[in-house]
C-alpha cells in the first residue's frame, strides 16, 4: 500500500455541498474534463487516446467528485461543431440555434473526470462524456451512489471503480454495449490506494 495524492482539494467547494448537486444528474444531463478521452467502443471495449489503447483489465480508477458537469454538444460528420459544459452548480447553458451541419442539433451530454490509480496507466487523467442513453444512465447511477455516500460519510467522497460493461439486445442493431462504473470502495481526496510497481507493459491498440 502506498499513500498517493488522488485529487488536489484546493479551491474546491465543501464536500458537504456535493450531495444536492449530484442528485441533479438524476433528472439532468452532465459532462466532464480531463486529458485523455476515455470511451467504450461498439464492441464493448474500454479505450482511450488517439491510438485507441485498451484499458488494462482490472485497473482501478478514481472519480473526481467535483468534476461532474452538464451541457450540450453538436456533432457534424465525425467532428465536434460546438460544445458547452458547465459545473452542476450552474444552470444548463442556453445554446441558441445549433451550428450549420449538426446532424442531430444540440445533444445533451453528461460526464466527469477520472484518474487511473493502479496498473500501467497509473496517474493518467481522463475525461468521460456521453450523449447515449446507456452512457448517461451509467454516470447518473454513479452520481446517485456518490450522493448517498457523502450524505453518510463526507470524509471519503472519491469513488474507486472498475470499468465494466453491460449490454442489451436491440431489434435492429443487435447487441448494444453500455458502460458500467462498478464501485469497489470510497476513499478520501488524498486517500490510500494499492499501486503496482511493475515494469510498464505495452498493450495492443484497437483499430
Image (cartoon, helix red, strand yellow):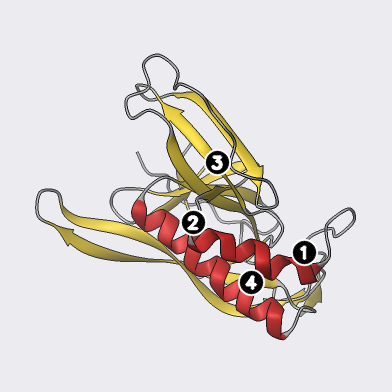
Q: Are marks 3 and 1 in contact (CB under 8 Å)?
A: no
Comparing labels 2 and 1, the label whose residue is closer to the camera: 1
Distance from label 4 to label 3 (Cα)? 23 Å
Residue 168 in sight? yes
Q: From the image, which quarter does the C terminus lie in?
A: top left
Q: Which residue is mark 1?
A: 6
Closer to us: 193 or 159: 159
- Using the numbered discs, state the Cα–Cα distance from disc 2 to disc 1 in whole angstroms: 19 Å
- Please identify, in this view, whether the residue under mark 4 or under mark 3 is nearer the observer: 3
Q: Earlier in the sequence, mark 3 or mark 1?
A: 1
Horizontal and vertical percent position of residue 116: 64, 60
159 left or right of 173? right
Q: Is residue 132 above or below residue 19?
A: above
Of the two numbered discs 3 and 2 in the rendering, the one whose residue sits closer to the viewer: 3
Question: What crowding class fits label 3: few (fewer than 14 Cα within 10 Å), some (14-19), or many (20 or more)?
Answer: many
N-terminal label among 3 and 2 = 2
Q: Residue at x 45, y 18 (%)?
A: 99
**Circle 3 — which element?**
strand
Residue reaching furthest bottom? Answer: 152
Secondary structure under the numbered disc 2 in the rendered image: loop
Q: Considering depth in this image, is 38 or 88 the residue closer to the camera?
A: 88
Q: Residue at horizontal 63%, vertical 71%?
A: 159
Which quadrant of the structure image shows residue 200? bottom right
Q: Dot 4 corresponds to which residue?
A: 159
At a point 76% along the width and 66% down the height, the residue shown is 17
Of pointers 4 and 1, the one earlier in the residue sequence? 1
Observer able to see residue 198: no
Identify the element where label 4 is drawn: strand
Residue assigned mark 3: 71
In the rendered image, the vertical position of residue 11 relative to residue 131, given as above or below: below
Amino acid at each position: 500500500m502506498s499513500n498517493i495524492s488522488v485529487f488536489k482539494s484546493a479551491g474546491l467547494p465543501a464536500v458537504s455541498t456535493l450531495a444536492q448537486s449530484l442528485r441533479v444528474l438524476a433528472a439532468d444531463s452532465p459532462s466532464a474534463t480531463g486529458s485523455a478521452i476515455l470511451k467504450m467502443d461498439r464492441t464493448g471495449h474500454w479505450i482511450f487516446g488517439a491510438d485507441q489503447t485498451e484499458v488494462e483489465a482490472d485497473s482501478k480508477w478514481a472519480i473526481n467528485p467535483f468534476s461532474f458537469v452538464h451541457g450540450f454538444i453538436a456533432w457534424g460528420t465525425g467532428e465536434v461543431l460546438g460544445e458547452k459544459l458547465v459545473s452542476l452548480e450552474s444552470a444548463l447553458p442556453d445554446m441558441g440555434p445549433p451550428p450549420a451541419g449538426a446532424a442531430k442539433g444540440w445533444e445533451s451530454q453528461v460526464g466527469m473526470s477520472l484518474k487511473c490509480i493502479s496498473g500501467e496507466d497509473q496517474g493518467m487523467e481522463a475525461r468521460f462524456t456521453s450523449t447515449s442513453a446507456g452512457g448517461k444512465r451509467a454516470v447518473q447511477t454513479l452520481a446517485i451512489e456518490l450522493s448517498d455516500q457523502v450524505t453518510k460519510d463526507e470524509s471519503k467522497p472519491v469513488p474507486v471503480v472498475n470499468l465494466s460493461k453491460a449490454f442489451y439486445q436491440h431489434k435492429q442493431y443487435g447487441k448494444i454495449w453500455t458502460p458500467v462504473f462498478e464501485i469497489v470502495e470510497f476513499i478520501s481526496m488524498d486517500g490510500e490506494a494499492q499501486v503496482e510497481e511493475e515494469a510498464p507493459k505495452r498493450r495492443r491498440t484497437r483499430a
